[in-house]
Amino acid sequence: MESSGENPASNPQEPAPDEDLGTLKYQLLGPSLTKAGQDSVDQQKVSEIIYNASKGSKFFNHEQDRDRNLTLKIEQILKEKARLDRLDLSSDLRRADEYLAELELSRDLSQHVIHVDCDAFFAAVEELDRPELKTVPMAVGKGVLTTCNYLARKFGVRSGMASFVAKKLCPQLVLLPQNYDKYTAKAQEIRAIMAEYDPLFESASIDEAYLNITPYCDENGLQPGEAVQRMRAEILETTKVTVSAGIGANAKIAKIASNLNKPNGQFQVPNEREAIMEFMRDLSVRKVNGVGRVFERELESIGVKKCGDIFPHRALLAKLFGEKAFQFLAQCYLGLGRTKIEPVETHERKSVSTETTFHDIGDKEELRAKLWWAAQELEKDLARTQFKGRTLALKIKLHTFEVLTRQTAPSRPVSLAKDLYSFALPMLAKLEKDIPNIKLRLLGLRCSNLVSTQKVGLNFFGIATQPKPATAPASKPPVSASSVNADHEICVEEAFEAAARQEIQDEMNDLEQLSQEIPDGSIAREPEGSATPEVVETPPMWDCPICTRPQVADDRTFNEHVDFCLSRQTIREVAQDTSEETSLIPHNSRKRKMPSQAGIPEMDPKQKRLFFQ
DNA sequence: GCGGATCAC
DNA sequence: TATGGTGATCCGC
């Protein structure tokens, strides 16, 4: 099927004849191509099936656009490289070498860091409940797969793949809905064991963790490899799930290594400079956490495929990709990474967000309902995490898959649905005005610039005071964890007073805010007699985003009313479109992840972030 | 500071 | 027929 009828001149959606389908098809293969379990798969055939399943869809066209843009960007990079190649780069070369030398001085080979990764975690947990699933290709997830077992991977099925595509690759694929609570419970069992090996271990996600096992090895007279063997055996014994592990001098090496003997295996890179350099030399840059498909292609275009290729290009990298990218790549070349492993609770959260995908919506009222829904979701999440946001962002995805964001700084930190809604609505209204015939497939809200609403942790003196989450059964308060700061008890009374003052101020701002926002609200409202100004009376009224009629501005009354309208609306929608049922009905009780997850990536997203302070 | 983009899971 | 949600960071303006 390679070329049969692929380029009929009449079809405007076909790429230009000279366009390279290779990069596009590679793009369509998805991000987890480098993951384990794909070795024996005929990628050629798989990408052909995916391509044909996707061809012509809006998603496909968007991917095609992105692919074209990347190709253009790479042309620019190459042009710039050609220009630089003609220049004298000796000073850049010197700077690069100085930086490498500086990094080399920071090399720390004294720690044994491991990265533990559960094998096909969600699928494995499901197989525990239903052993018969072990013998069939199976995946977890609805519209998009979150995990699949290794039998499914033999067909080219991967996480992140649309389930209808997966079904094309593997018609007998068994699809299970996600049961996050179950996975969370299992993850806790595993963490309990990991805590024996490093009480200060760091959860990187629900199924991954970093541990520093140096003290454990010292205390028990074990080599790192032996300790990890023991831990993996213990995990399998008591929880019945297999994990893979990587062992190295830092988090970056451990992370890479944990993928090398998957599933149910481990791999160690010795804590020796030469061994590390050799390990990195032949390692594809794509295997490094932070190098995705885009950066991989950019690097490849200038001849950097393996980490060893970084060195000969060191003089150019900063100019071509930026200083941060250069620093990141320098550390890849040297095999350097973070050795500090700490509980995820100590990390400071930067944002709280929610978003939902739905069938294409162009109707303004329906969009307001979605916005209201998002506002309510975000209010819940902000309450759970105990934050308010100084910045509020609206995110939309057009029916073409193009993503736009708009943000605003409310006059005071916001956390209530009504505030989130009323500050977000003008942004949505403006987008509707600017984009004729707008149709959305996703809408979301995000709060950043967070302010803690915790009574004790009012962030005096800029101290990040994240109290330990309720999850830690914490048999004992920080005994071994003596490093935890005990100095945030201070000024409790002042904190309360300040909070009280703030609350009064908030109330006043509220009223003021409301009087300003009502005119915007009237965008949502039908003309309704065109009498606008009278709404700003002492007992404030809010427009219901659904029925657009003003309601008494009491939280409970208002919410109940809107919920009622929403449920009526939901029923109408479901009647029209059953396929969207789950995303429209407010039953999202199992939506969230576990408290301690917080998703702190182990290292620089792409070329970013310094990890050596 | 804002908006777009990339990345991880 | 049809392609997710949450959080983070960096770049160019």
Image: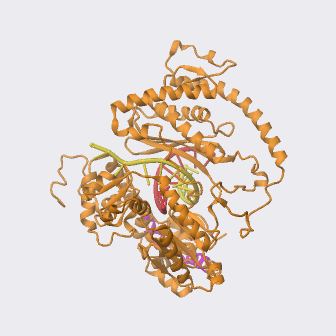
Chain colours: A orange, B red, C yellow
Answer above or below: position of A284 versus C10.
below
Q: Is residue A607 visible?
A: no
Magenta stretch, main secondary structure class: helix
Residue A128 image offset from top left, x and y in percent: 41, 62
> Residue A416 lies in what quarter of the image?
top right
Name of the residue lying farthest toward the left: A4
Residue range of the region highlighted in magenta in the rendering: A77-101
Answer above or below: position of A102 versus A342.
below
> Residue A572 lies in what quarter of the image?
top left
| Residue A98 forms part of the magenta stretch | yes
Residue A27 image offset from top left, x and y in percent: 35, 59
Q: Is residue A278 left or right of residue A149?
A: right
Give the quadrant of the C terminus of chain A: bottom right
Q: Is residue A7 left or right of residue A366?
A: left
Marker count (numbered): 0
Residue A147 image offset from top left, x and y in percent: 40, 59
| Residue A148 forms part of the magenta stretch | no
Residue that appears at 76% across and 62% down = A485
Answer above or below: position of A507 versus A136.
above
Residue that appears at 58% across and 44% down = A381
Foreground residue, A362 or A199?
Answer: A199
Give the quadrant of the N terminus of chain A: bottom left
Residue A248 image offset from top left, x and y in percent: 55, 79
Q: Is residue A30 visible?
A: yes
Residue that appears at 77% across and 33% down = A504
Foreground residue, A433 or A219?
Answer: A219
